[in-house]
Amino acid sequence: MNCHRVQNLLSSYLDQELSAEERREIRKHLFACDPCSRLCEELTLIKDSLENLEPPAISGDFLRKVHLYREGRLLQETFRWGKRLAMAAAWILLFLLTSFLLFPNSSGPELAKKEGQLPEYTPMQQEAREEEGNKGPLLPRLPGLPVSR
């Protein structure tokens, strides 16, 4: 038997899951091969230390989840939060899509000022502006904001 085959069968060898003939061949190889015998010793130590561990304490939350799982409600509870998240994402997507469809070329007034593109005004708006005595560039007046001069 070669080292690769023995290393693949070591776990089964330690668990006593092999036939008598296979155990005998592995034992012969372990006596002759130092790296495989060290690996076998390490696996034996790991197995012994794992067998000596105590089971973990079960929390109340875990017991609640086991109870819900047995009743078939854990899956429903999980899907409820998933549905809420999907619904929120759908509303946000719908909002963004409609805002882009309703205002495809919109840009803020600050962007228009920076680029030098001021909105066109009707002659009536221009006359009202001239009557107020302002000769500067015609800027839009937003409701609720004070006029800066």
Image (cartoon, grey):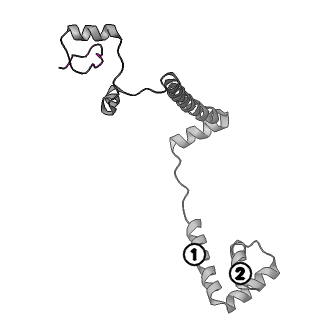
Image height of 120 relative to 127, above or below? below
Residue 46, quarter of the rendered image:
bottom right
Mark nearer the viewer, 2 or 1: 2
Q: Main secondary structure of the magenta part?
A: loop
Image height of 61 relative to 36, above or below? above
Image height of 112 relative to 125, above or below? below
Residue 8: x and y, percent? 71, 75
Cα distance in 3D space between marks 2 and 1: 21 Å
Front residue of 81/131: it is: 131
Q: Residue at x 70, y 84 (%)?
A: 3
Image height of 96 relative to 24, above or below? above
Q: Which residue is mark 2?
A: 4
* Three-letter residue code for mark 2: His
Residue 32, quarter of the rendered image:
bottom right
Residue 87: x and y, percent? 56, 28
Name which of mark 2 and mark 1 comes first in the sequence: 2
Residue 25, quarter of the rendered image:
bottom right
Check disc 2 and report its element: helix, strand or loop.
helix
Tell me if 29 is positioned left or right of 95 in this view. Answer: right
Tell me if 110 is positioned left or right of 20 in this view. Answer: left
Residue 84: x and y, percent? 55, 29
Check disc 1 and report its element: helix, strand or loop.
helix
The magenta segment is 138-149
Q: Residue at x 20, y 9 (%)?
A: 132
Q: Which residue is mark 1?
A: 45
Label 1: few (<14), some (14–19) or many (≥20) C-alpha neighbours in 10 Å: few
Tell me if 130 is positioned left or right of 124 in this view. Answer: left
* Three-letter residue code for mark 1: Leu
Question: Residue reaching furthest bottom?
Answer: 32
Residue 24: x and y, percent? 77, 84
